[in-house]
Amino acid sequence: MSQFAFELSHRDATTSARRGVFLTPHGPVQTPGFMPVGTQGTVKGVTIDQVAATGAHMILGNTYHLALRPGHETVRKLGGLHGMSGWEGPILTDSGGFQIFSLNAINNVTEEAATFRSHIDGAKVRLTPEHSIEIQEALGSDVAMVLDHVVALPAEPGVVEDAMARSIRWAKRCLEAASRDDQAKFAIVQGGLDTELRVQCATELSSMGFDGYAVGGLSVGEAPSEMYRITAATCPALPEDKPRYLMGVGQPIDLIESVARGIDLFDCVMPTRNGRNGLAFTDLGKVKLRNAVHREDTQPLEQDCPCLACRHSRGYLRHLFIAGEMLGPILVSIHNLTYYQRVMQGARDAIEQNRFDAYREEKKRGWGLV
Ligand SMILES: [Zn+2]
């Protein structure tokens, strides 16, 4: 019997938003949900207890980075990602496909493998779908992603179609290579900005019986409206009873618009990366803490936020950044992660109350987007 299940408890009355829970061996993940990114086996600058306190259920680890350093066999000997990091909740690992693409390390892609150069020492590394699964099994994540072929957009139609077809064949190879039944396998829909290719890819992958389905290859520079269009076209072609994950997205508005189109899970470096740079997300839009206007600002980032950063004034947080103190990036990362979780908690509540559309409008007004 599968150790994974996805239970849908409610559908919003006027949008395609869904409320559910994804059950894993390391606990439940409430959906719609946001996963903080722990690229190197750590959510940058934030301890596991602090990550848990933000309200996060599941975190993400990066196969590419961990396979290169410290090496997946080392992670295995340290107790897998759970044992090594001490995080006791669910973990999802990506397959390495997107990192190879985004770090521009790609050397070439053949039917057999992707060959790339390590960003650490320039060594040539060869990654096959089977190897990606082997690495993720050593990491011991609750969810493994299939290796996919990501291409830069815009691209010639033939290039996108070729990569999509290869992604389907590689997904099948991943499924056949997998040996752990305590690890869910998620497929990744590719197909660029072509809705027909996306639907074709989603339909073929759906027939292969994965535990969940991701929409990949987006948030790579296309307009948000293009991303929403592709998400809206892809979701109906995916199984109703499996979680849907939009990879690498995004701004709070992107999360809300994508939930409205039927997405259940997200991950993004945005809360932590921006937090390290002194940019905070709030219900009234983004706050640039380095700005002089905050020098003597006695207000917290948000009045009703329970996070560690919001015990302090904006003036203090600004001072930490200007003085180059490490506590500044840590606190604002915590605030941003808490903010993303609060937005998602609000989304879950709104879906249960059939008022997701009103919630979306309320958030957009606050963010100055209407
Ligand atoms: Zn806060």
Image (spheres, helix red, strand yellow):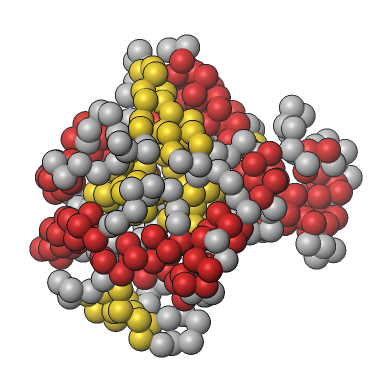
Q: Nearer the viewer, residue 149 or 320?
A: 149
Identify which residue is drawn at 50% across, 82% down: 120
- Whether residue 108 can be seen here: yes
Splitting the image into 4 quarters, where does residue 310 fall?
top right
Location of the N terminus (image quadrant) = top left
Q: Is residue 194 above or below residue 122?
A: above
Identify which residue is drawn at 52% across, 48% down: 59
Left or right side of 17 for 279: right
Identify which residue is drawn at 62% across, 36% down: 55
Rendered location of residue 122, percent (x, y): 43, 87
Rendered location of residue 225, percent (x, y): 33, 41
Q: Is residue 311 above or below residue 328?
A: above
Splitting the image into 4 quarters, where does residue 164 fall?
bottom left
Q: Is residue 193 above or below residue 54?
A: below
Q: Is residue 199 above or below residue 260?
A: below
Left or right side of 365 for 159: left
Rendered location of residue 73, percent (x, y): 47, 72
Left or right side of 145 for 197: left
- Whether residue 18 can be seen here: no
Left or right side of 108 for 369: right
Rendered location of residue 112, percent (x, y): 18, 73
